[in-house]
Amino acid sequence: MLTKYQSLCYKIFGKRAKKSSQIEYIKRGLERSFMEIRPEAYISFAWMNGVLAGIGGVVLIFIYYYLSSIGMSFPPKLLAIIVPAPILLGALAYFVTLMLPESRANSRKKDIENKLPYALNFIAAMATAGVTPPIIFKSLAEQPVYGEVSKEASWIYRDIAIFNIDIITALRNAVNRTPSIRFQEFLQGAITTITSGGNLKTYFLAKADEYMRENRRIQKEFLETLGVLAESYVTVVVAGPLFLIIMLSIMSLVGGGGGGESAKLILYLIAFILLPISHAGFALVINSMAPEV
């Protein structure tokens, strides 16, 4: 469903966007990110963002020269940034818009791979109860606790129930669509099991056990890494700055003239810039590394 702004972009650039060399790349990214918009409409949206950002850069140039004409002074180096602003802003807006689907696909990939071991336990339990694969995926789609895995299951069940596609073709479509390699491997294994006449319940149980063992290994490795990060945190963010603060405080007290002022400036930089950045950096690193629990 297009927004009013995206519809306007498509009306203006739609015909040219259909001939763009970026169509296949954008189509792949939109499928993997579950963004329900046609590739040509999204390319039109990216082009319009680039044009508007370029116009914004032109406005900045006019503002700069207007303020200069009424007597305001600016550093000469600022002109080297202002003059290419239309091109830089336009290109930035265009490429950021193009990269957005792939960025969302990567976020989905992380969520799928974090929740997949637990979703497989659900699938294995349903299979043990004798539930058929289409109903398994339907039930999984109704469990929002499994995040993006539930969305993948909903699209598989949609292909089967609404478009009347057989289970093998629906699973193959999901293999081509999902951004997660682990989920692709699971689905491909299910396809092979079905086509070879194997026992799907046994396959689901084996995969659930395999992924849970792998998940426990990943969590164990994370705890070991967390111990190393904790030691680094104490050394780099706690002990190191504290030592510097004590030394610089003594220098500012006993030092005279410019030396004391320099020590105070460094103290301010440590307290208000270095320490917050260090704390935020460690928090981001740990958050990005933390597995699903």
Image (spheres, helix red, strand yellow):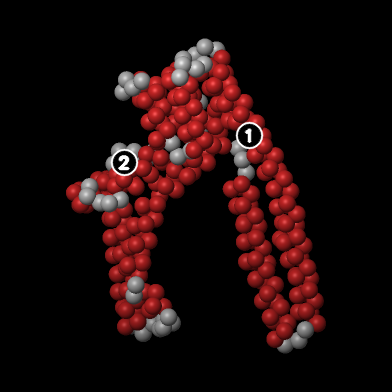
Relative to 208, residue 52 above or below: below
Residue positioned 38% across, 26% down in the render:
170
Instruction: Work out which residue is located at the far top of the displayed protein and give it.
Output: 130
Neighbours of disc 1 within 10 Å: few (<14), some (14-19), many (20+)? few
Q: Which mark is residue 214?
A: 1
Classify residue 278 as left or right of residue 27: right
Image location (x, y in percent) of residue 4: 27, 45
Please report whichever mark, 2 or 1, sits nearer to the chain's N-terminal start: 2
Residue positioned 62% across, 56% down in the render:
280
Instruction: Work out which residue is located at the far bottom of the displayed protein and give it.
Output: 257
Q: Which mark is residue 119?
A: none
Q: Quadrant of residue 120?
A: top right
Relative to 267, residue 123 above or below: above
Classify residue 94 as left or right of residue 105: left
Relative to 242, residue 73 above or below: below
Asked whether residue 45 appears in the rendered view, the answer is no
Which of these two is toward me, 226 or 62?
226
